[in-house]
Image (cartoon, grey):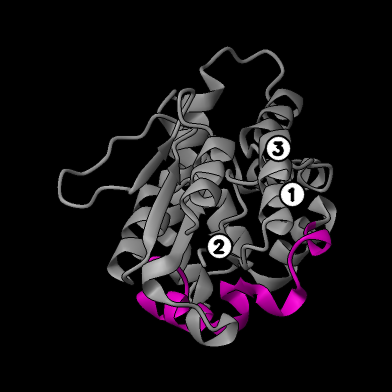
Amino acid sequence: MAAIIFDVDDTLYDQLTPFQLAFTMNFPNTEIPVEQLFKYSRIYSDEVFELSENGSISKLDMQIYRIRKALAHYDIQITDEQGAKFQANYQYYQSQIQLDPAMQEALDLCVAHHFPIGIITNGPAEHQKKKIKQLGLNRWVPTEQMLVSGEWGVAKPDIRIFELAEAVMDLKKETTYYVGDSYENDVVGAKNAGWKAVWINRRNHAESSEIKADILIDQETTIKNFLLSLVLTGA
């Protein structure tokens, strides 16, 4: 039977929503494309994520760095204090996040059809667990089947975190699907681990010609349709 393992950020909820609210609060009279600003911030976040994970820089330094570098694309300079205030507001709005209705339907389908499900998410353990609690994911996923990189000292796209999930959840590579939004972390990571990759490409990122997702979730192929196809084929 197929197993479905989910990412959290920008997969189970729309990460742009709390970012946009924090931006409006901190820069109320600034007219720039906020979604593109968000994309830049994620690029810079990935750039220094490993340094934050291994303790070379603090989590707050990483968070200030990513918003400062993103705003620099629009010739906006900010102080450390402004960066920290933005992050505090961003985290407040993250505490209000809600599960994407389509993803809730997907989780319900997984449970109804007895697909084993789990979570692999990158980030500091305490921070990610707050999101997991806010989204109410324990309703569908047992705690022991939730892997947070900050707890294990290894993060996507490193195949070791996928192998760890295999051991913890007794997964078979050939029947395990990973559902995520990040091409580099989720698609490349899952494929290199021998899993199938389901890409929720919310931000229209480019896909490399070398490694392709098995399933692309878009307006035509919904997460519900993908799961129903597994049910119909008896996967």
Dots 3 and 2: beta carbons under 8 Å?
no
Q: Secondary structure at mark 2?
A: strand
Dots 1 and 2: beta carbons under 8 Å?
no
In the image: residue 66, left or right of residue 142: left
The residue at the point 82 percent across, 48 percent down is 95
Q: Nearer the viewer, residue 127 or 69?
A: 127
Would you place residue 87 above or below residue 164 in this image?
A: above
The residue beneath circle 1 is 108
The residue at the point 76 percent across, 75 percent down is 143
**Callout 3 crowding tier (Cα within 10 Å): few <14, some 14–19, many ≥20:** some
Q: Secondary structure at mark 1?
A: helix
Q: Nearer the viewer, residue 155 or 69?
A: 155
**Callout 2 crowding tier (Cα within 10 Å): few <14, some 14–19, many ≥20:** many
Which x, y percent locates residue 133?
Answer: 83, 60
Q: Which callout, 1 or 2, points to the residue nearer the camera?
A: 1
Q: Secondary structure at mark 3?
A: loop
Q: Which of the numbered marks, if any, corresponds to residue 5?
A: 2
Marks 3 and 2, the one that precedes in the sequence? 2
Q: Which callout, 1 or 3, points to the residue nearer the camera?
A: 1
**Callout 1 crowding tier (Cα within 10 Å): few <14, some 14–19, many ≥20:** some
The residue beneath circle 3 is 100
Q: Which residues are magenta?
A: 137-165
Amino acid type, label 2: Ile
Marks 1 and 2, the one that precedes in the sequence? 2
Marks 1 and 3, the one that precedes in the sequence? 3
Quarter of the image for residue 28 reads: top right
Amino acid type, label 3: Asp
Q: Nearer the viewer, residue 138 or 87?
A: 138
Residue 106 in sight here:
yes
Amino acid type, label 1: Asp
